[in-house]
């Protein structure tokens, strides 16, 4: 929603052109009131009520919160000022219409301001519902787009988890440094698994109908911590340093240090499979 357009009829400049001669010598207060009304209108940051420009659920929800706070203090109060301006214009329309020496155009000019102020004030009061409707409409579009992308994201996630489980099995059967590096470096199964934990918390939170029947907790708190180092995409050199630190701290040989990692990861398999099951349940709900 771009904005409410300010009526030309409610500008002081337009009134100065149309007001009768008597109003040029005797103040009606209309011009000052219109000037203040336009000032209130111009003070509104109308872009705060635009929702079509957002492409993510987080962004559009944040924008909506800003709009909800801005409307009462920056927009709704304009309705009162508009009503006051219309009331004053109506008063002068009545006065001018009773004066035989004053042209009818004077009363008509005042009546035009009163009508414009009434219409403008109604737009202001209706604006809250209007921007809320636009927010809901645009949010549904984004939600539909994100939901449509969920299936390939989660399908790829399951594949990554399977790769992680396969790498763990290989590593358990042959606990070598080479197999550890194959598992824990690059964009492999371990990194993919950790990414899915992040996706569960950040993407599925917007789809409680899919997430809540399966698992309401945070994957980053439950499933991610034990394997975070394996999915961190550390370089082979970094892993070499980490193994050296482990060996020195525990008095281990490299073979013993590597074996410890293999044993540890083997113990994580049940939880990894549990999380994989959650991903598959959500995929089944998506259909």
Image (tube, rainbow, N blue to C red):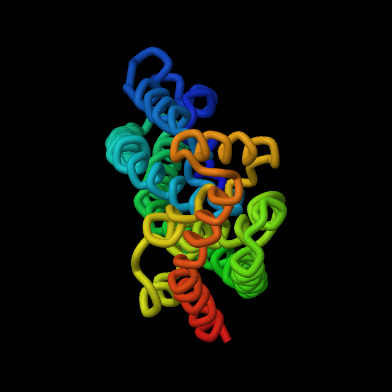
Q: Quadrant of residue 154?
A: bottom right
- x%, y% of residue 187? 70, 54
In front: 279, or 79? 279
Q: In this view, does 34 lie above or below 53?
A: above
- Foreground of the two, 76 or 20: 76
The count of marks equals 0
Residue 265 horizontal/vertical position (percent): 51, 62
Residue at image location 35% in from the left, 43% down from the top: 71
Q: In this view, does 1 lie to the left or right of 78?
A: right
Is the residue 274 above or below the residue 40 in the image? below
Residue 137 pos. (x, y %)? 52, 65
Residue drawn where x is 49% and y is 29% of the image: 11
In the image, residue 193 sits, relative to residue 186, either above or below, namely below
Front-lying residue, 135 or 231: 231
Q: Judge whether residue 87 can be spotted in this image.
A: no
Q: Can I make out residue 278 in this image?
A: yes
Q: In which quarter of the image is the C terminus?
A: bottom right
Q: Quadrant of residue 110?
A: top left
> What residue is drawn where x is 48% and y is 63%?
200
Q: In which quarter of the image is residue 56?
A: bottom right
Rendered view: 108 above or below 55 = above
Residue at (34% x, 69% y) in the render: 216
In the image, farthest residue toward the top: 25
Q: Is residue 28 left or right of residue 247?
A: left
């Amino acid at each position: 929603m771009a904005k409410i357009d300010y009526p030309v009829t409610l500008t002081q400049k337009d009134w100065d052109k149309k007001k009768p001669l008597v109003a040029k010598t005797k103040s009606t207060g209309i011009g000052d009131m219109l000037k203040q009304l336009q000032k209130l209108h111009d003070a509104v940051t109308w872009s705060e009520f635009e929702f079509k420009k957002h492409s993510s659920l987080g962004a559009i929800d944040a924008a909506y919160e800003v709009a909800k706070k801005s409307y009462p203090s920056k927009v709704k109060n304009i309705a009162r000022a508009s009503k006051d301006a219309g009331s004053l214009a109506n008063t002068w329309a009545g006065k001018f219409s009773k004066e035989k020496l004053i042209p009818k155009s004077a009363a008509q000019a005042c009546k035009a301001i009163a009508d414009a102020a009434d219409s403008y004030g109604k737009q202001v009061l209706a604006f809250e519902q209007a921007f809320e409707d636009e927010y809901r409409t645009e949010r549904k579009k984004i939600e539909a787009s994100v939901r449509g992308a969920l299936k390939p994201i989660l399908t790829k996630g399951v594949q990554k988890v399977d790769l992680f489980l396969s790498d763990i099995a290989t590593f358990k059967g042959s606990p070598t440094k080479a197999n550890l590096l194959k598992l824990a470096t690059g964009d492999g199964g371990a990194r993919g698994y950790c990414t899915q934990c992040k996706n569960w918390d950040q993407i599925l939170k917007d789809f409680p109908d899919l997430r809540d029947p399966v698992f309401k907790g945070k994957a980053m708190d439950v499933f991610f911590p034990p394997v975070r180092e394996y999915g961190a995409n550390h370089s082979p050199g970094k892993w070499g340093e980490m193994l050296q630190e482990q060996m020195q701290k525990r008095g281990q040989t490299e073979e013993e240090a590597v074996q410890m990692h293999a044993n540890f990861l083997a113990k994580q398999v049940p939880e990894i499979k549990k999380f994989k099951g959650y991903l598959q349940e959500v995929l089944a709900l998506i259909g």
